[in-house]
Amino acid sequence: MKKRYLLQTGAAIVGVMALSRYLSSRSEAQTASESGFEIVKTEAEWRRILSPDQFNVLRQHGTEPRFSSLLDKQFAQGVYHCAGCALPLFSSDTKFDSGTGWPSFYAPIDNAIRTSVDHSFLMTRTEVHCRRCGGHLGHVFDDGPAPTGERYCINGVALKFVAQ
């Protein structure tokens, strides 16, 4: 009886440890975001310059609620910049209405983003980050329109729109 109990307990612990990696909302890039980027700030510095919602998305890899961003239905000419460091990320020329409830683009501006593998929520996705400050922007999927076939599904709170 004790041997079976120990085996079951051991298997349960191993299972929980294995699943914890996939249940965590942290991605591999979150720990890397403190180095390797041009703009590096302490948590306190980020909290001073970002709203609570921006901090949650950009620095803690959160997701804003669907259809909550005014930028989802914004189709004026302009450029979408990183809300954390003002780097131009996406042109309005590549924006489209994906119907997902988040601003969507089929391509970023050249050299504007980095990607990493995100294993959160029992799935594997490609996470999109600002290449200059490492801020979490959203995810990229392969179900977008031509010419790229990609859909950059970006949190509106992580962006600042600058009209042209």
Image (cartoon, grey):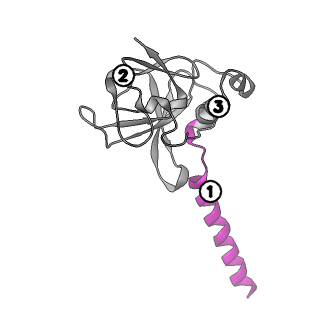
Residue 152: x and y in percent read: 40, 35
Magenta residues (range): 1-29
Q: Quadrant of residue 113?
A: top left
Q: CA distance from mark 1 to mark 3?
A: 24 Å
Q: Is residue 136 magenta?
A: no
- On the image, numbered disc 2 is attached to which residue? 92
**What whole-number distance in Å separates the C-alpha atoms at marks 2 and 1?**
38 Å
Q: Nearer the viewer, residue 132 or 152?
A: 152
Label 2 neighbour load within 10 Å: few <14, some 14-19, many 20+: some
Q: Residues within 10 Å of mark 3 (few under 14, many from 20)?
A: many
Q: Nearer the viewer, mark 1 or mark 3?
A: 3
Q: Tag 3 or tag 1, which sits nearer the N-term?
A: 1
Q: Is residue 120 above or below residue 139?
A: below
Mark 1 Cα within 10 Å, few/some/many (few <14, many 20+)?
some
Q: Secondary structure at mark 1?
A: helix
Quadrant where the C terminus sits is: top left
Left or right: residue 53 versus residue 6 is: left
Q: Residue at x 62, y 56 (%)?
A: 20
Give the mark nearest the N terminus, 2 or 1. Answer: 1
Name the amino acid, label 2. Ser
Which residue occupies 27% across, 37% down?
145
Marks 2, 1: nearer the viewer: 2
Indicate the quadrant where residue 43 lies.
top right
- In percent of width and height, residue 56 lies at 63, 36
- Is mark 2 in CB contact (under 8 Å) with mark 1? no
* Dominant secondary structure of the residues highlighted in magenta in the image: helix
| Residue labelled with disc 3 | 55
- The mark found on residue 20 in the picture is 1
Residue drawn at 75 percent across, 26 percent down:
44
Q: Position of residue 60 (x, y in %)?
A: 63, 37
Quadrant of the image for the N terminus?
bottom right
Instruction: Say which element carries label 2.
Output: helix
